[in-house]
Amino acid sequence: MSTTAERLGTVLCGVGESPIWRRADQAFYWTDIPGKTLWRWTPETGAFAQWALPQMAGSIAMRGDGWLLAMEDGFYACDALREGQACAARPLASVAHAAPGMRFNDGRCDRQGRFLAGTMVMDMALASPAGALYRHDARGVTVLLDGLIVPNGLAFSPQGRTMYLSDSHPSRATVWAFDYDTETGVPANRRVFIDALPAGRPDGAAVDVAGCYWICGNDAGKVYRYTPDGRLDRTLDVPAAKVAMCAFGGSRMDTLFVTSIRPGNAAPGALEGAVFALHPGVQGLEETASAG
């Protein structure tokens, strides 16, 4: 076990998000939202690859041998990627945003393969509660929740019957838990799971095999592990203050990948925007592919 964060290559993302380990490729993928780029790192070779996207992608999910992407104005599909070619994304379903200047943000599939993703007003200074949580499946698109400012921290318990969601805007900085109906894909019984992190704001998250919730503390350079009853269990340090999202991967699913954000005023040598790997001695759960 090593909790020392290892930087992956020299990549610096404007907003590194939606990290996913793809077992079939034995590779780690993530997006740079403002960079409109999908990245891949292959541990066996140490090689990086990247694909241009037609819009900003806030979150991604595996779909067959390709990808499902929640981008600026809706959900898109991208077939198998080929190096040297752009991602040929095609629209699946659009959404009617509640305000101008919005895009999709954090998202992932539930254990049944429904893709859930939230939207936000990109200008966080407006603190606009125009965001919503959407569900995309074979039947179409459904709004599950509204009134969100910056939806984040979406994750599911191992059996899928608890859904976690945070709002990372400074005015809220709260993580909620919901009862999740695995038959219908509808959350209910919203309650506070974490009312405040020890430091930082709650951002992206992952769940391990024990059902513990790992949440990035944005602005604090921390990743926190909470037990299913809401008790803080562990704290890991990352050498970038604005950690964005974490995900388990690797051949044994025991590597914790962490993406980060690079603000416009970052110092030239700062590691904000880099991607890191830690080995906390815990196994995570594989992401479920989209069934829609």
Image (cartoon, rainbow, N blue to C red):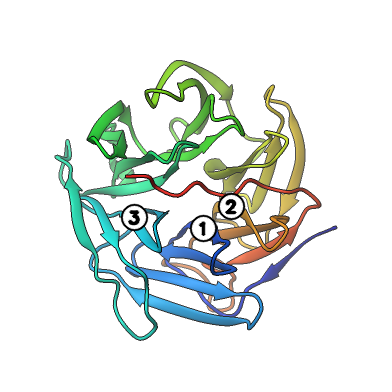
Residue at x 73%, y 35% (from the top left corner): 210
Specify few, some or many for label 3: CA neighbours under 10 Å numbering under 14, 14-19, or 20 or more: many
Residues 253 and 65: in front is 65
Q: CA distance from mark 1 to mark 3?
A: 13 Å
Residue 74 in the image: state x and y as whole percent: 22, 49
Q: CA distance from mark 3 to mark 2?
A: 19 Å
Q: Which residue is mark 2?
A: 246
Left or right, residue 94 beside residue 146: left
Specify few, some or many for label 1: CA neighbours under 10 Å numbering under 14, 14-19, or 20 or more: many
Dot 3 amino acid type? Leu
Residue at x 25%, y 56% (from the top left corner): 76
Looking at the rendered structure, which numbered label has been put on residue 68? 3
Of the 4 image quadrants, the one containing the C terminus is: top left
Which element type, helix, strand or loop, lies under badge 1?
Answer: strand
Dot 1 amino acid type? Pro
Nearer the viewer's eye, disc 1 or disc 3? 3
Residue 283 in the image: state x and y as whole percent: 73, 49
Residue 194 visible from this viewpoint: yes
Specify few, some or many for label 2: CA neighbours under 10 Å numbering under 14, 14-19, or 20 or more: many
Q: Quadrant of residue 121?
A: top left
Asked if labels 2 and 1 touch by Cβ distance under 8 angstroms, the answer is: yes
Asked if labels 2 and 3 touch by Cβ distance under 8 angstroms, the answer is: no
Residue at x 45%, y 30% (from the top left corner): 172
Of the 4 image quadrants, the one containing the N terminus is: bottom right
Residue at the far bottom in the pictured view: 84
Nearer the viewer's eye, disc 3 or disc 2? 3
Dot 2 amino acid type? Cys
Left or right, residue 213 beside residue 163: right
Q: CA distance from mark 1 to mark 2?
A: 7 Å
Looking at the rendered structure, which numbered label has been put on residue 19? 1
Residue at x 64%, y 65% (from the top left corner): 276
